[in-house]
Image: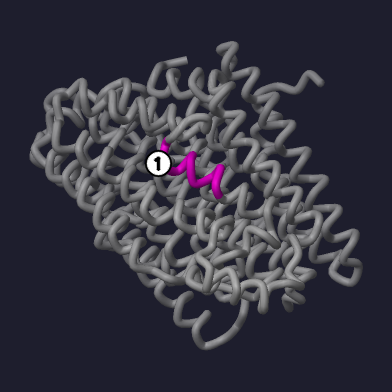
């Protein structure tokens, strides 16, 4: 297949939107509806892979849709970080759809057509974010993603779901209106340019004070990166069905947040500028606080999905910390961690959903002995936990190595200690879950034998998805080179 870069970019962005239309038209035919979702998701991944091959060979092109003002347009372009994010999102769209088929049917969820429709619209927004040529285009698709995921967060329609949805919208739209949009306008006023440019868009005579203020506004304004204190939307959104949680944590929302942060810091400010600003150290230590505080909060949660949500807040701060270090190693670590965390965390949420479907259990204290009835699920949970912790043989060990190396290069000893202590906290709040599942105490084992004898593994399609993503955690340890190559190209002009 010999498609131009321009054609690939257009198809990758628009096909998910056409999928949403196809899903709505097939609402009376569930098998067709889900076949459309899986088929197009697979096709989009193939197209992104073709774009990846073009990108690493140095081929690039810009696709313009609308020009509002000279230099202010909606346009798209592929570079290394764009392709990395698009590869992850498109592949996990396939896997999450496969998982959702088993989960939504077994759990007898209502409004499944609406779910698949807004899932596809969300992927459309993700691809628009990933391939944006400038900050203005990215901002538009960033907001589309917020609005497209709101019906997914409130899918259940209960009072609790609606409250969670209101918190979700209030924080994400609020941070965009109060911080992100004014920072974007400020950047346009100072630089006169919003195109993502290696080395940044600001001239040497730009005021360091204004740039320092803009940096803080962008970090707080990109609320999807869940930096404290603008993080509460993430645990609030856990009222959503598990496939939505997987979408939020691995495929779309939070990854769109840290992707946007990296793109802004690397291609609007430039790493050299970031390293010189007076607010950088403040933001670095804020990320360190977010890493440790969210890990400590996670340890206290008995609800599995809420524990995983606070874990995500901590892991996102790893990515923010890496790029704020303004070193090559830190940037590589951040870029790689987008991929490594995606596979680890989506597996953990898949397992949480499988446990809910099979046993109707949501509390960790209820899961002792569950590994005897659901060995594949609990083993997958264990493997994914190792990746989040950063232990071999899982991919998370590579990204955490480069993050530590980035802190070492700048002699940030306190940040190095933060990363190491956080890994110990990861062990404390993740590993006891599969350990208790396989090796319950005597009293817990007796209770488990009396109450969980009829529990079996999740539906086949959901189980296949769990196996794929958990194996992905291991494959990324032994074959990290494609991810590393793209991460190493981030910030370098094509």
Q: Which residue is pictured at 25% across the width and 35% down the height?
A: 324
Asked if the stretch drawn in magenta spans residue 345, the answer is no
In the foreground, 337 or 380: 380
Left or right: 354 in relation to 440: right
Q: Residue at x 87, y 66 (%)?
A: 30
Say what secondary structure mark 1 lies in. helix
In the picture, measured across the screen, residue 165 lies left or right of residue 470, that is left
- At 35% from the left and 42% from the top, the residue drawn is 261
Specify the quadrant of the image occupied by residue 353. Answer: bottom right
Decide: few, some or many residues near mark 1? Use Cα within 10 Å; few <14, some 14-19, many ≥20: many
- Near-viewer residue (255 or 429): 429
Judge by depth and name the residue closer to the eye, 426 or 491.
426
Q: Is residue 22 visible?
A: no
Instruction: Find residue 232 and report its image quarter.
Output: bottom left
Note whether residue 171 is visible: yes
Q: Is residue 387 magenta?
A: yes
- Residue 16 coordinates in the image, percent (x, y): 70, 49
Specify the segment rendered in magenta.
382-390
Question: For this view, does 259 lie left or right of residue 11?
Answer: left
Q: Residue furthest bottom?
A: 159
Horizontal side of residue 112 vs 64, given as left or right: right
> Majority secondary structure of the magenta segment?
helix
Q: What residue lies at 56% left-to-right and 60% top-to-bottom?
A: 437
Q: Position of residue 340 (x, y in %)?
A: 50, 37
> Residue 150: x percent and y percent?
54, 69
**The N terminus: image quadrant:** top right
Mark 1 sits on what residue?
135
**Vertical comparison of 403 with 231: above or below:** above
Q: Residue 369, how many percent across, how many down? A: 59, 64
């Amino acid at each position: 297949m010999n498609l131009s870069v321009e054609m690939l970019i257009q198809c990758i962005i628009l096909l998910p939107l056409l999928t949403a239309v196809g899903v709505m038209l097939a609402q009376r035919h569930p098998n067709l509806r889900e076949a459309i979702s899986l088929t197009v998701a697979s096709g989009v991944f193939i197209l992104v892979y073709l774009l990846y091959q073009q990108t690493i060979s140095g081929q690039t092109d810009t696709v313009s849709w609308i020009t509002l003002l000279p230099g202010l347009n909606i346009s798209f372009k592929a570079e290394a970080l764009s392709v990395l994010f698009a590869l992850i999102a498109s592949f996990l769209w396939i896997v999450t759809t496969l998982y959702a088929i088993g989960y939504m049917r077994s759990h007898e969820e209502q409004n499944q057509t609406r779910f698949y429709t807004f899932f596809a619209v969300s992927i459309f927004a993700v691809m628009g974010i990933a391939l944006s040529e400038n900050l203005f285009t990215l901002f538009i698709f960033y907001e589309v993603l917020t609005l497209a995921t709101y019906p997914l967060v409130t899918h259940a329609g209960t009072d609790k779901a609606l409250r969670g949805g209101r918190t979700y919208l209030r924080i994400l739209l609020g941070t965009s209106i109060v911080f992100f949009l004014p920072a974007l306008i400020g950047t346009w006023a100072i630089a006169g340019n919003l195109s993502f440019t290696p080395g940044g868009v600001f001239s040497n005579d730009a005021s360091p004070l204004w740039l320092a203020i803009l940096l803080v506004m962008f970090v707080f304004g990109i609320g999807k990166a869940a930096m404290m204190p603008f993080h509460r939307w993430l645990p609030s959104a856990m009222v959503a069905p598990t496939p939505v949680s997987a979408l939020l944590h691995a495929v779309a929302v939070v990854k769109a947040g840290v992707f946007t942060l990296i793109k802004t810091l690397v291609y609007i400010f430039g790493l050299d500028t970031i390293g010189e600003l007076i607010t950088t150290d403040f933001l670095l230590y804020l990320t360190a606080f977010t890493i440790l505080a969210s890990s400590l909060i996670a340890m206290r949660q008995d609800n599995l999905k809420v524990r995983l949500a606070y874990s995500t807040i901590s892991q996102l701060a790893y990515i923010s910390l890496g790029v704020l270090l303004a070193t090559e190693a830190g940037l590589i670590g951040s870029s790689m961690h987008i991929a490594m965390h995606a596979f680890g965390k989506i597996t953990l949420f898949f397992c949480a959903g499988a446990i809910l479907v099979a046993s109707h259990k949501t509390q960790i204290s209820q899961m002792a002995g569950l590994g005897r009835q659901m060995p594949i699920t609990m083993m997958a949970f264990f493997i994914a936990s190792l990746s989040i912790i950063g232990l071999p043989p899982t991919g998370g060990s590579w990204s955490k190595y480069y993050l530590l190396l980035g802190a070492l290069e700048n002699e940030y000893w306190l940040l190095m200690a933060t990363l190491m202590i956080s890994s110990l906290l990861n062990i404390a709040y993740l590993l006891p879950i599969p350990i208790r599942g396989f090796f319950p105490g005597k009293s817990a084992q007796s209770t488990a034998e009396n109450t969980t004898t009829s529990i079996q593994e999740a539906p086949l399609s959901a189980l296949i998805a769990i196996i794929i993503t958990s194996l992905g955690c291991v494959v990324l340890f032994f074959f990290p080179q494609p991810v590393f190559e793209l991460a190493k190209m981030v910030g370098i002009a094509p």
